[in-house]
Amino acid sequence: MADLIAACSWSSGKDSCLALYRAIQSGFKIKYLMNFISHEYQRVAFHGAPAELVNFQSQALSIPLLQRETTKDNYEAVFRKTLSELKEMGVRQLVRGDIFLLDLRDWVEDICASEGIGVISPIWGYPGEDLLREFVSLGFKSVVTSTQAEKLNKDWVGRNIDESFIKDLKSVPNVDLCGENGEFHSFVYDGPIFSKRINITKTDKVLINGYWFLDIQEYELLAKGDKK
């Protein structure tokens, strides 16, 4: 049973969320969400979610958050140290939301192996459209928080990921439907494994270094039945 004790590498977006869901359904006991934020911006890199907002996800999922600050220069060192902490707390596996980027998966698996932790990749190798439709059909709710501006313009930022989104995205050339090449990122605010939901009440759109970001400024954690 010890081999079923795991943490989830948590980006705040749809892929890590679906991987978490599948891992839970497979019997893994998720003890922690492992999340990294930019030291400079206090947000999840590329996704743009503020640190506190990720903490709201942790509360809504009822899974403790292990959040660490990183810079471009110390990411690997912080990653290794966090894995060591997790192992000391009894974690034996790390759940990841990787889909087809082999170089990234190999890098993570090599580091985890050196720290004595296995890697579970529940959505690895599945077609992007199948994963996206599964995510939506299960009832997860998420919003696009960043896009590569040259591929997806300002109008895509802030859109909910639903069937309409999938239909429209399929018409855009050279964009992976799950954004696996970094075309877009997301933030999950509700779903079947959430005991509460996050209500986003104020946002803005900003262009930074060739990326459109949804600047989520105000939000609240609500009970599922709250219509607010």
Image (cartoon, grey):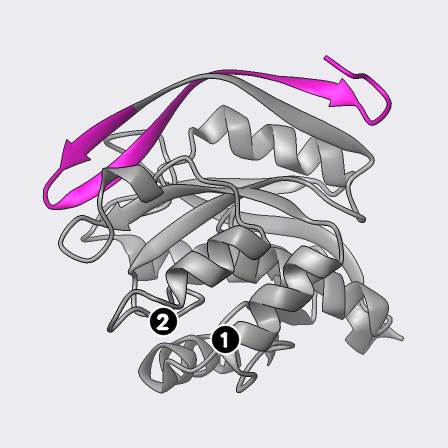
Amino acid, disc 2: Asp
Magenta span: helix, strand or loop, mainly? strand
17 and 58: which one is in front? 17
* Residue pictured at 64% horizontal, 36% vertical: 57
The residue tagged with tag 1: helix, strand or loop? Answer: helix
Judge the density around disc 2: few (<14), some (14-19), many (≥20) Cα neighbours within 10 Å: some
180 and 161: which one is in front? 161
Which dot marks residue 128? 1
Q: Position of residue 122 (x, y in %)?
A: 65, 77
Q: Position of residue 9 (x, y in %)?
A: 55, 59
Mark earlier in primary sequence (2, 1)? 1
Q: Is residue 91 left or right of residue 214?
A: right
Q: Is residue 215 left or right of residue 93?
A: left
What span is in magenta?
A: 205-228
Query: Which residue position is annotated with label 2?
Result: 176
Amino acid, disc 1: Gly
